[in-house]
Image (tube, helix red, strand yellow):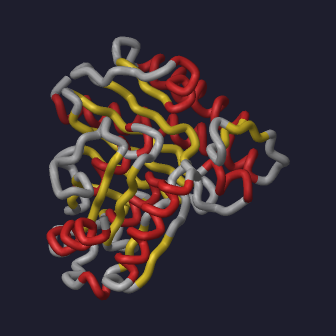
Amino acid sequence: MGENDLLEQFLSVAIEAAKKAGEIIRKGFHEKKNVEHKGQVDLVTETDKACEDLIFNHLKQHFPDHKFIGEETTAANGTTELTDHPTWIIDPLDGTTNFVHGFPFVCVSIGLTIGKVPTVGVVYNPIINELFTGVRGKGAFLNETPIKVSSQTELVKSLLATEVGTKRDKSTVDATTNRINSLLFKVRSLRMSGSCALNLCGIACGRLDLFYELGFGGPWDVAGGAVIVQEAGGLVFDPSGKEFDITSQRVAASNPYVKDAFVQALKEAE
């Protein structure tokens, strides 16, 4: 099999897995949720666990020699090292708090890294039925229609997304709100939709112009969305302006035109 065929196969199997997990999420979305606390405000539901098992099993059937990193297994077993091997990095339910509250911004995120490089991305919101996909070198799509990042060139006309994160100690909250306060004078408006993966997809399809998040859960939040942004013509980078590191728990994304001004504004917000 050529590399192209392989990547196509990786993508189609990942889409199948995301859609199967999406059915579980859609069912659970309208039922009473049994919620556990992972941290102070970090929630986990039975649906998270069921979806992760289903996705892992589906992918392992097709790709038994690949490696796997998932949010729930990592939470249970400690950190997982990312190697050069083909590795599936999965967030079975990004936006758990939204899920618990019946706020329809939830998704399954599936990313495949090869040589640590995000190569295939699938992000599926089963509630509003949006399937974002991207394959390195092959473009990005929303429900099979090609997408591209916005062409906004001015920070002051840009829509910014970020998240508060899961920590609620005073110094973290103050740093977060001070940063937002500074940025609000420089952009058009702010959104916090509660899903890192969907924020990245928002950049990819031009709904959002700017996104950053500091201290999110782990590589499963960004592995799928990063490819989709890049394939839509966008940039994924460290909020400092340095190169993006999938394991760093820091991410920023934008179109190419506003990146430099955005990085400058983030520096000034510190």
The residue depicted at 34 percent of the width and 32 percent of the height is: 10
Res. 211 image quadrant: bottom left
Task: Name the residue furthest right.
Answer: 32
Residue at the far top in the pictured view: 65
Residue situated furthest front in the rendering: 171
For residue 231, say whether it is visible.
Answer: no
* Image-quadrant location for residue 231: bottom left
Horizontally, is 95 left or right of 266 in the view?
right
Query: Is residue 58 visible in the rendered structure shown here?
Result: yes
Q: Quadrant of the C terminus?
A: bottom left
Query: Which residue is located at x 49 percent, y 20 percent?
Result: 78
User: In the picture shown, does residue 134 fall above or below 39?
Assistant: below
Q: Quadrant of the N terminus?
A: top left
Residue 49 vs 22, above or below: the answer is above
Q: Residue at x 50, y 50 (%)?
A: 124
Residue 17 at x, y = what percent? 51, 35
> Which residue is nearer to you in this view: 8 or 83?
83
The image position of residue 7, as x and y in percent, is 26, 34
Along the viewing direction, whichever of 266 and 226 lies nearer the viewer: 266
Q: Is residue 54 above or below residue 225?
A: above
Residue 95 in the figure: left or right of residue 217: right
Residue 129 horizontal side relative to residue 202, left or right: right
